[in-house]
Image (cartoon, helix red, strand yellow):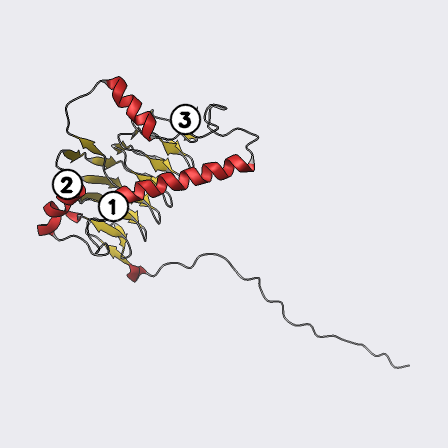
Amino acid sequence: GTVVIMTTETAPMTPPPTTAPQPEPPSSYIRTTTQSYISRAAHILGPDRVHAKGKSVIRPSVRIHGDYGAVVSIGRYCHLDEGVVIAPTVVDLEVAVDDDETKKNARENFPMSASSSSSSTGFSTGFSNHRRRNRDAMMKQMRDRFLADLSPPNNNDNDNDKDNDNDNDAAKRTKPRQKALPLSIGSHTRICRNTVVRSLSIGSNVYVGSDCLLHPRSVVKDCCVIEDGTVIPPDMVVPPFSRVRGVPGRVVGGLPE
């Protein structure tokens, strides 16, 4: 008898589409003399007052405000993700008031979340969808207010300030009886996407998550982790080797030394 062998041809399998982001071309970054890489889509306002020690990466849409008249210092090996905003603290040069009145004003200007009294982290385990929506709306409102305070003094926000215009821009940023304080960021620090920083200082070896708000006059010491969505209230000092979470942010644990 004759044996007939039937074969079927199958179409070659195609690999599933990849979702990995495409690397940015090197031409989209400027390499400085200190070996830092700054995206051409970043906004460095008042560049003569922005001091970067080198070997750092500044991604697109980052905005660093040196146009307040105060120096913004960035250490070595830092990474600023997309959408990060860095601006100094601005204080009033008025007659000194009592500390109790200052703290009262800070509490009135800083909204507390509905769940801040229900758990040490500011987020209860059984958080309802309604409270989550309220929290998200509050975070958006706070971020919008932050960015409104940082609105450009003129309509041309895309160009870097020229040296002879820095003093004029600083005068437009601050009122006659206000002063901007220097802001320093230590080395080996990463600030993730869409975080707004108006602190006095952030130490070295610090990780700041995405969508965080760091209010004026706050201080973050060395070797800390600020989790995603955390709001650091005004005048808060985060001790070294701390993990911070919540709205408002609270120390929820420590890091190994």
Q: Nearer the viewer, residue 176 or 79?
A: 176
The local crowd at label 2, few if under 14, some if 14 to 19, many if 20 or more residues have their Cα within 10 Å, is: many
Q: State if disc 2 and disc 3 touch (CB < 8 Å).
A: no
Q: Nearer the viewer, residue 188 or 67?
A: 67
The local crowd at label 3, few if under 14, some if 14 to 19, many if 20 or more residues have their Cα within 10 Å, is: many
Q: Please, what is the three-letter code of the amino acid marked with disc 1?
A: Ile
Residue 210 in the image, given as x and y percentages of width and height:
40, 42
Left or right: where 126 falls relative to 158: right
Mark 2 element type: loop
The mark nearer the N terminus, 2 or 1, is: 1
The residue pinned by badge 1 equals 64
The residue pinned by badge 2 equals 69
Q: Please, what is the three-letter code of the amino acid marked with disc 3?
A: Arg
Residue 222 lies, with reference to residue 27, above or below; the image says above
Find the distance from the CA under tag 2 to the CA under tag 1: 12 Å
Residue 218 in the image, given as x and y percentages of width and height:
29, 29
The residue pinned by badge 3 equals 250
The mark nearer the N terminus, 3 or 2, is: 2
Q: State if disc 3 and disc 1 touch (CB < 8 Å).
A: no
Residue 94 in the image, given as x and y percentages of width and height:
15, 27
